[in-house]
Amino acid sequence: MSNEPTLVEDVMSTVLVTVSPDATLVDAAKRMKSHDINALLVPSTEIAIVTSTDVLEAVADEHDPSSITVEEVMTRSVETVPPELRLTEAAAMMENFGFSHLPVVDDDLVGMVSSTDITAQLS
């Protein structure tokens, strides 16, 4: 067994699933369900994401998910991590900031690491 620390790049998802900022929350929810994920990257001038929690909160606030857009609820300017960051450090960031997903950036966007990925690896 290796004594090398587990890095973000060892567990991150490299299939980057996106949704348009103009898409409705219904579209985003369908996309998340079809890919069995809880967050989508939103192509814009800065890295943005929309999560299943964003969709749930909008519905709970009685917004019509078929008329509200991803752009209205997405998180802009999200925290990112490099692929060579230790997984334990990414986990600490998520815990400290209350995040469940962190885009992974190395010059370009290269992946996404989720709390589920971390839990599966560290347990």
Image (cartoon, helix red, strand yellow):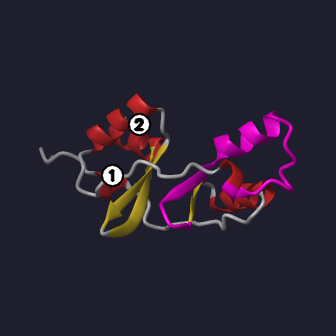
State the residue at coordinates (36%, 54%).
11
Q: Amino acid at mark 1?
A: Val
State the residue at coordinates (41%, 48%).
79
Is residue 47 positioned above or below 51 on the image? below
Q: Position of residue 54 (x, y in %)?
A: 67, 43
Circle 1 residues within 10 Å: few <14, some 14–19, many ≥20: many
Is residue 98 positioned above or below 102 on the image? above
Q: Secondary structure at mark 1?
A: loop
Residue 123, by quadrant, is: top left
**Residue farthest to the left, as pictured:** 3
Q: Which residues are magenta?
A: 43-71
Q: Is residue 48 magenta?
A: yes
Residue 8 lies left or right of residue 45; in this view the side is: left
State the residue at coordinates (49%, 68%).
15
Q: Amino acid at mark 2?
A: Met
Q: CA distance from mark 2 to mark 1?
A: 11 Å
Q: Secondary structure at mark 2?
A: helix
Q: Which mark is residue 114?
A: none
Is residue 97 positioned above or below 29 on the image? above
Q: Position of residue 28 (x, y in %)?
A: 71, 58
Residue 100 lies left or right of residue 8; in this view the side is: right
Question: Front-most of 36 and 32?
Answer: 32
Q: Which mark is residue 81?
A: 1
Circle 2 residues within 10 Å: few <14, some 14–19, many ≥20: some
Is residue 92 positioned above or below 41 on the image? above
Q: Earlier in the sequence, mark 2 or mark 1?
A: 1
Q: Is residue 66 magenta?
A: yes
Q: Is residue 33 visible?
A: no
Q: Which mark is residue 94?
A: 2
Q: Position of residue 29 (x, y in %)?
A: 73, 54
